[in-house]
Amino acid sequence: MKDKKFDIIIIGGGPAGLTAGLYIARAKVKVLVLNEGISGGQMVLTHEIANYPGINTISGFMLSRNMQKQAESFGCIVKSNIKITSFNLEGKVKTITVNEKEVFEAKAVIIATGGKSRKLNIEGENEFTGKGISYCATCDGDFFQDKEIIVVGGGNSALEEAVALTQYAKKVTIVHQFDHFQGFKHAIETAKNHKKIDFILEAEIVGFYGSKSLEEVKIKDLNTSKEFTKKIDGVFIFIGYVPQTIPFKNIIKLSKRGEIIADKNMATNISGVFVAGDCREKNIRQITTAVSDGTISALKAIEYIQSK
Amino acid sequence: MNLQTNLKHISTEADYNKIVSDNENIMICCGRMGPMCVPVYAEMEDLQNEYSNVKFYDMLFDLPEAGVIRNMPECAGFMGLPFTVYIKNGKVVKATSSIQSREQITEILDSVF
């Protein structure tokens, strides 16, 4: 890529980053989206989106493609599958080095790096991912026809996916750390009233074991600290997301959970650096809220560069 | 019926056998247009330009003839889409189940081919 100087660079190509790219390009401001991976972020991992206003249902993949095409049609450049190897966000000119060789410059930066599925990070998790452990019910549910499975988590995703998985599995056990759930009331009631679902509460899985595929889990009772094993065919893990902010931790102010702290204008503690989407400290994480963040950060970043 | 990707598709067992006999290094991703599969196809589409010594293909998991991949001994115990196999000189040298990152894919490509 010959052109290395931009007005605004966006790090991340999920719904927040692509929306920011759309708004900035439409304002005839020179913008580049740098994306470590493919466009769409977590949205690509969603089989069906049914709560994006104006669209009945759409796959996450198609919505991502549409968002990217729309941003590009106004002149936004999207560079995907790159690795950001270093950056300097302080100072008037921000620099971002890609693949250790290409250095891009901008007057402002929007961080929209999103989040990724939280893992349990315990023995056997990596070894049995795809061999009994899954993070996607719609993708892998049919491998568990008439099998016995566990769903880990206590939020809406865990409860709703547990119910969805009953169409395949003969029995679903929800394992959750607390004695109560974090999901919406109707999701809790639906799971609690389901004949095929039972619960192991105040407990956590501490290990996965098997040979070619997962065969059993070790579960710890959090009240007594006693551990026991349970024979199982599959485990689906839905325990939320972690923000992708580690590279920024010594530069930008983060919350205890590692989310970037910003004001109502999406401005961080560094002049000219804005944030948008799931990597920002906030309560509600939806595509619509990411799009909202992207809009605000774009307009405020434009305002910032035009005031300088 | 094929997957909606920009990769070359394998539709039949005969296709598979011909591709394996005609090429030294092959990566085949067998899946659906689902959330765990699509990111792998996208990475493969991009990696085609970087790895000219490797042929990249996909195959729709639900095709009856995709049994040629589904039933490979190397895929025994797999319970996550997509099933991805790496073949060198007609022999499966690596197989993975479920989504793989670019780093995971390139690590395999660099080590087996």
Image (cartoon, coloured by chain):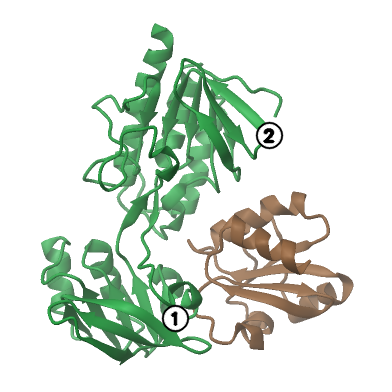
Label 1: how many residues lie within 10 Å, few (<14), some (14-19) or many (20+)?
many
The answer to whether A139 appears left or right of A78 in the picture is: left
Q: At x 46% / y 53%, what residue is drawn?
A: A44
Residue on which disc 2 sits: A101
Q: In the image, what residue type sits under mark 2?
A: Lys
Q: Is residue A141 above or below residue A28?
A: below
Tally of numbered discs: 2
Q: At x 31% / y 42%, what residue is drawn?
A: A259
* Residue A53 seen by the camera: no
Q: Which quarter of the figure is the N terminus of chain A placed in?
A: top right
- Relative image position of residue A72 (x, y in whole percent): 56, 31
Q: Secondary structure at mark 1?
A: loop
Camera-nearest label, 2 or 1: 2
Q: Is residue A97 above or below residue A195?
A: above
Q: Quadrant of residue A100?
A: top right
Q: In the image, what residue type sits under mark 1?
A: Gly
Do circles 2 and 1 both sit on a common chain?
yes
Q: At x 40% / y 68%, what residue is drawn?
A: A135
Do the numbered discs 2 and 1 sit on residues whose CB atoms are within 8 Å? no
Residue on which disc 1 sits: A132
The answer to whether A14 appears left or right of B106 in the picture is: left
- Rendered shade, chain A: green
Q: At x 77% / y 76%, what residue is drawn?
A: B16
- Give the CA distance from mark 2 to mark 1: 40 Å
- Relative image position of residue B85 (x, y in whole percent): 68, 73
- Relative image position of residue A125 (x, y in whole percent): 43, 74
Q: Quadrant of residue A82?
A: top right
Q: Secondary structure at mark 2?
A: loop
Give the chain coloured brown: B
